Image: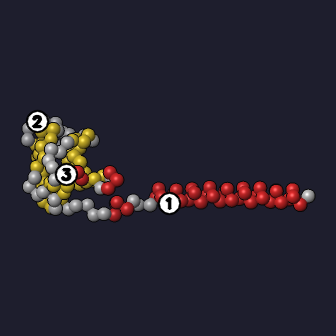
Amino acid sequence: MEDKNFIKLAIKMGKIALILGIVLSLFLVAIQITETPKVQERDMPGIEWDIERINSTHILVKHVSGEPIEVERVLITVEGRGRPIHKIGLIEEGDAIVTQAYVGTLIEVFWEQENEYLRLMHRSRV
């Protein structure tokens, strides 16, 4: 009789341990989801960008002022589609990038942090 009681007690304790494990796991997942990623805490480079239309099909994306930035860390999009940057090294004050963009399109310049996390630096419709 004592063996049966011991088995019942062990099963109850196992169920309690399983439920506690599941609750703790869900709690940890919730913390991870709501926690601000560390990369967001980094300061974005202080850069002023300007977009200038060259003609009906192309624009200039100008680095007007601020610190230099690595080409690999910049993403220019036209209506949400990435555009190539034909430059090597740094984009510095006074540099301009030519890309295709028709009249009325949305142009966005993003800074790409570690882990491909993007932060918007400039947005305009030209």
Q: Nearer the viewer, mark 3 or mark 2?
A: 3
Lower position in the chain sequence, tag 1 or tag 2: 1
**Residue 50 seen in render:** no
Q: In the rendering, at what x and y percent does residue 116 appear?
A: 32, 51
Q: In the rendering, at what x and y percent does residue 63 appear?
A: 13, 54
Q: Residues within 10 Å of mark 1 (few under 14, many from 20)?
A: few
| Amino acid type indicated by mark 1 | Ile
Q: Are marks 1 and 2 in contact (CB under 8 Å)?
A: no
- Please name the residue shown 91% across and 58% down the image: 1
In the depicted structure, whether residue 122 falls above or below residue 38:
above
Instruction: Give the spatial CA distance, label 1 vs label 2.
Output: 49 Å
Which of these two is toward me, 54 or 76?
76
- Please name the residue shown 14% across and 47% down the image: 87
- Please name the residue shown 68% across and 59% down the image: 17
Q: Dot 3 lies on which element? A: helix
Lower position in the chain sequence, tag 3 or tag 1: 1
Q: Residues within 10 Å of mark 2 (few under 14, many from 20)?
A: few
| Amino acid type indicated by mark 2 | Ser
The residue lying furthest to the right in this view is 1
Instruction: Give the spatial CA distance, label 3 vs label 1.
Output: 35 Å
Q: Quadrant of residue 67?
A: bottom left
Q: Nearer the viewer, mark 1 or mark 2?
A: 1
Lower position in the chain sequence, tag 3 or tag 2: 2
Q: Which residue is mark 1?
A: 31
Q: Dot 2 lies on which element? A: loop
